[in-house]
Amino acid sequence: MPAYLVGTIRITDDSRWQQYVKRVGATFTAQGGKVLFRAVSAAQLNGQAHGDRIVVAEFADLQALKRWHDSAEYQELIALREAGADVVLTAYET
């Protein structure tokens, strides 16, 4: 059953965030993950969103998503991610 990673993002340091973005995409490949889309908020329709950006990635299943998240390659990027943005990551299954 497919699993989806949804990240909501509030940029705090654009330079560091761009460094993270340049490197994070390669970490998905080993676990078969792929980014479906990245987007910037266009309009607030109801309630308060966490940030103004979102990323959605797809994995074959929840175990693959967790292997990606726990991988050494991704873990090495967390300090850079935290230096560049306030990010909330949530896993969803269909």
Image: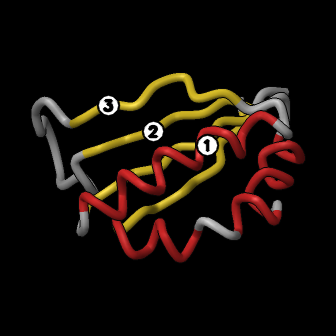
Drawn side of residue 25 relative to residue 81, left or right: right
Residue type beneath disc 1 = Leu
Secondary structure found at label 3: strand
Secondary structure found at label 2: strand
Q: Earlier in the sequence, mark 2 or mark 1?
A: 1
Tag 1 residue? 5
Which of the image's four quarters has the N terminus? top right
Which circle, 1 or 3, is nearer the viewer?
3
Residue 40 location, quadrant? top left
| Badge 1 density bin: few <14, some 14–19, many ≥20, Cα 10 Å | many
Residue 64, how many percent across, how many down? 86, 43
Q: CA distance from mark 1 to mark 3?
A: 14 Å
Which of the image's four quarters has the C terminus? top right
Q: Earlier in the sequence, mark 2 or mark 3?
A: 3
| Badge 3 density bin: few <14, some 14–19, many ≥20, Cα 10 Å | few
Q: Earlier in the sequence, mark 1 or mark 3?
A: 1
Are the two marked residues, 1 and 3, in contact with CB atoms closer than 8 angstroms?
A: no
Residue 91, how many percent across, how many down? 65, 49
- Residue under the point 28% across and 60% down: 15
Tag 2 residue? 55
Relative to 4, is 22 above or below?
A: below
Residue type beneath disc 2 = Val
| Badge 2 density bin: few <14, some 14–19, many ≥20, Cα 10 Å | some
Q: CA distance from mark 2 to mark 3?
A: 7 Å
Q: Return the mark for residue 39.
A: 3
- Residue under the point 81% across and 65% down: 72
Are the two marked residues, 2 and 1, in contact with CB atoms closer than 8 angstroms?
A: yes
Residue 82, how many percent across, how many down? 44, 73
